[in-house]
Image (cartoon, rainbow, N blue to C red):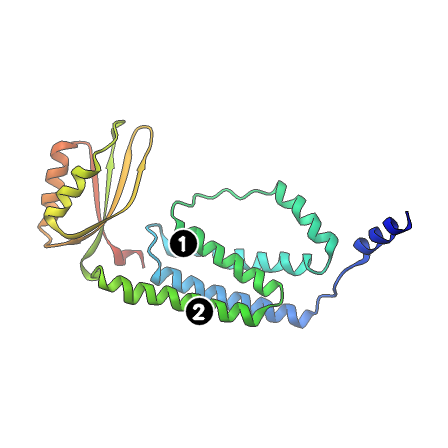
Amino acid sequence: MEDITNIESYFATSYETIVFTNFILNFFVCAILTFALKFVYIYFGSSLTDRRNFSKIFLLLALTTMLVITIIKSSFALSLGLVGALSVVRYRGAIKEPEELTYLFLCIAIGLGTGANQVLITTIAFCLIIFVIIFQKKILSSKLINDNNTHILTITINDKAKPDIEFFTNILKKNTYSIRLKKFEKYDDYAELIFHIQLDKFSGVSLIMNEIQSSYPNAKLNFLDTKSFL
């Protein structure tokens, strides 16, 4: 009985004093790394969403994670209470692409590392990850697609029937240098296809639209330059 009392007393009184100077340092490091991540996501990301608007949540997410970790690591009892809190609080967001989720996870990782007072290893790991992202975007992607001629083609079909993807790819192959299916989603009453295409010449736009709408009269097509997302 005495052992149980001692254990309960340990959980109730066991805590680590938070050093204010360390907290301020961690706060600013977390903010700086998150700002850098935001810049990388806007200029080197490949998501089709509005990257500038989506990245506005990065700073708040990272700092909130840092604050939570800073508080709960000071007390074992608080860390156990976090489990109950997470079972009540749920985040529901419209994450349509894996890249968006990956960058959010990076924000959480920054908050976890700085909140746990592991500033040095967090900063080093962050720099290595950013180097890999930029290297992959600048070096590897440039060998596959010339961004100067790359456009995003969005095809929306208001039809309950499943669209023939091969039909669209055959049309695009005839009028473009290269194509890449970025996304395909089928809903109850419409379907949406998004392609990355490299145009042979601008006249190919009208040819693509005419051929697609000859078989899908209700299809809506949208051509967009990839640089417009910056």
Residue at the (26%, 59%) spot, across then down: 227
Q: Which mark is residue 128?
A: 2
Kindly indicate the quadrant of the structure image that contains residue 169. Answer: top left
Name the kind of residue labelled 1 in the image.
Answer: Asn
Helix or strand or loop: what does disc 2 sit on? Answer: helix
Bin the neighbour count of mark 1 within 10 Å (Cα to Cα): few under 14, some 14-19, many 20 and up.
few
> Which residue is labeled 1 in the image?
53
Image coordinates of residue 177 in percent, x first then y, are: 14, 54
- Asked if residue 60 can be seen in this view, the reply is no
- Crowdedness near tag 2: few (<14), some (14–19) or many (≥20) residues, C-alpha within 10 Å: few
- Disc 2 marks a residue whose amino acid type is Leu
Residue 199 image position (x, y, % from top left): 14, 53
Residue 46: where, in percent of width, then height?
33, 56
The alpha-carbon separation of the residues under discs 2 and 1 comes to 25 Å
Secondary element at image label 1: helix
Q: Is residue 209 above or below residue 225?
A: above
Quarter of the image where one finds residue 185 = top left
Q: Position of residue 100 (x, y in %)?
A: 41, 52
Residue 143 visible to an observer of this rendering = yes
- Identify the mark at residue 169; answer none if there is no mark: none
Nearer the observer, 13 or 19: 13
Tell me what residue is drawn at x 40 percent, y 64 percent. 39
Furthest-right residue in view?
2
- Which quarter of the rendered picture does the C terminus lie within? bottom left
User: Which one is in front in this view, the residue at disc 2 or the one at disc 1?
Assistant: 2
Q: Are marks 2 and 1 in contact (CB under 8 Å)?
A: no
